[in-house]
Amino acid sequence: MSAPNQPPSETIQSKGSGSRAGWYAAVAVVVIVIIVFAALYAAGYIGQKTTSTKQSTVPACTSFTITAAGSTFVEQLMAEWALKYTVNPVDYDPVGSGAGISSITAKTIAYGASDAPLNTTQAAGAPGLLTMPETAGAVAVIFNLPGVSFHLGDSLNLTGQVLAGIYNGTISWWNNTAITSLNPGVSLPLVQISVWHRSDGSGTSYAYSQFLSDSSSTWKSTIGYGTLPAWPKTPVGGGAKGSSGIAGTVKSTPDSLGYVDLGYAFDNQITYAAIENPSGKNIVPTANNTASALADILATTTLPAGAASWAAVSMINAPGAGDYPIATFSYMLYYQAADSNTVVANAADASALVNFINWTVTTGQSYAGQFLYIPLPPAVVAADQATIASMTFDGKAIAPCS
Amino acid sequence: MLRRSRNSGQTFSSRLRRIFDLTFLSVTLVVALGLLALLTAFVLVLINAAHLTLARYGISLLGNPRWAPSSNHFGLLPFVDGTLITAAIALLIAVPLSLGIAIFLSELAPRWISEPLGYLVELLAAVPSVIFGLWGIFVLVPFMRTSIDPALASANASVDSTLHVSIPLFTGPIEGSGVFTAGVILAIMIIPTISAISREALRAVPQPQREGALGLGATHWESTRISVLSYARIGIIAAIILGLGRAVGETMAVTMVIGNSDFIPTSLFSQGQTIASLIANEFLSTYASPLAASAFLEAALVLLLITLAINIGARLLVWRLVKSTGGGGIE
């Protein structure tokens, strides 16, 4: 304001000073109230769950949002479950199995989903975490070879040994004799293979690298397996984030190769390879030959209890002659003592969570087939239900709500 | 005096106002200091979280070329490399183009073109990076693979054969995704930022500057170069630094087109990884050892320090320029 304006502005000021002081007062009061509430919240006086309201007999399901995160392998099934389950809202974030394990360890979600079982270090970091298979499925080796045609019902034939060679960079051309000898009558191009792996921590990578380890002693001794193995350098290719990242990259990149869950490959119409199983048969993955792999594995394995380690459970290289060799369980991870998870605020929330998990292993299984996941056999469902029944809230069994 | 005699309640009211003013001052002061505390907290938390590897390897990780947390290799060189290369490519492409846009908009274009075009440029600067990333995957990567990359590769080959050297820039298998494509997408992302701010700097140049140069017989280009560009260069440098900051820290778009390979790129067509894309890819991954998690956070610390260094460097440069030219920039 310049000097000549001074007198009028002063009169305005004196006229409006009462209302302006009121304005300042209002702002100050709001600020102070916010600060006080923030301080009270931080000090734990308000907003926190109060232990006195914890009760274990709550019949009605609350509007608790069941938050979950993890595997992109089961993304399609989780999305379908969230859609079909109407009692409580379910919010599933497909961030990768590795992220699922760290989120449930940090107790920022109600349950985690991972296709890889917890290793010793991870289990030690999350005491009381239960492991429960919620579905199973095949890992498809997808490829994009424009102009290469196969006989009807046939696909590109690959073995674990050759895939290990491709992924560690020793086999880098499509017309390498190691590949052409498996595919008589197919003219493979003289181009380098663009090799893609998951760049984030992934249960699909876990199952796939476990298959490579199982098939190649070189891979086993140099790389091994895990959710984020030390992928060797290949002349062409790199990493992509999530199943969608791999599927998108392989679909849009000529001469590329990658791996995703079968349903993803099928839905996105990406061609996938036939993989040689331990009986020497080339198997194109289907829901049927993955289900038979699961049945054959279950015939020879005793599944551990929910609270025990699942690290030894593997669906790789199932023994049956018609079994597809790269498959995996996908696990739900949640706390046995539901009250130890800060996300589950009270017994009603715990009931809602238990109801949902129960639903996924019973009614929920009927939605698995359409995405080429394998519905769990009755024996596994029974074991799962025993795991669910072992959950507690404040030391008491959790009553189901309705 | 007059007011007080007219209304005795004013004294109380004005004292109250002073108290509120004081409260307001202290609240804003706390908020402002909070920002400083936040930055300090960032650095401290990162140092604390990375202390395992900092104590064990120090900054030697920056020179180690192998990143494989599952087998205890924690080299950050590939990512530092990728970050610097992509940012350099982005600046090389974006700076001349942005300056051209800015000069055209402020010096050459008639008002009816420069106004709407200027708004469009500013609008582009506000497009979220994930949109650029999606466009990168669906449009830019295939376009690079089929058109730009082969042309660059053959140019590189012909230069090699005529000069009898081997320049490892545009060589190797052409994939579409890779370090060069990431640089290109970063360039596209920072062009609006740099040109919008440079345009403001050019428009702030006083009209007599131009008229003086023209009056002395300079051509339009000479007037722009001598009296406008040199006058506005501090603003232009600030614009470039802001663009560089965005390029170094950009995550989503880069992750979507760079190929995410944890190795030092052997040519500009190779897949690579920047520190930001490494963090985007692995931020929630569970590492087998606490040492690996610590190395990962050391990468984040390095990124924070690189951006801080860029900003401090820019500050120093601007200060030096202001000092040597007395603020105006007229030579």
Image (cartoon, coloured by chain):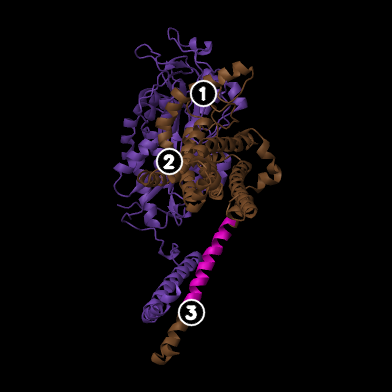
Chain colours: A purple, B brown
The residues bearing labels 1 and 2 have C-alpha atoms spaced at a distance of 27 Å
Q: Is residue A249 magenta?
A: no
Residue A329 % position (x, y): 44, 33
What residue type is disc 3 on? Arg
> Nearer the N terminus, badge 3 or badge 1?
3
Are dots 3 and 1 in contact, CB under 8 Å?
A: no
Q: Looking at the image, is mark 1 or mark 2 nearer the viewer?
A: 1
Could you tell me if residue A251 is visible in this image? yes
Residue B130's mark? 2
Point out the stretch of residues depicted in magenta. B19-39
Number of the front mark, 3 or 1: 1
Same chain for labels 3 and 2? Say yes or no.
Answer: yes
Residue identifier under label 3: B18
Mark 3 belongs to chain: B
Q: CA distance from mark 3 to mark 1?
A: 69 Å
Question: In the figure, residue A228 lies in which quadrant?
Answer: top right
Q: Residues within 10 Å of mark 2 (few under 14, many from 20)?
A: some
Residue projecting furthest to the bottom: B5
Instruction: Verify whether residue B34 appears in magenta.
Output: yes
Upstream in sequence: badge 3 or badge 2 = 3
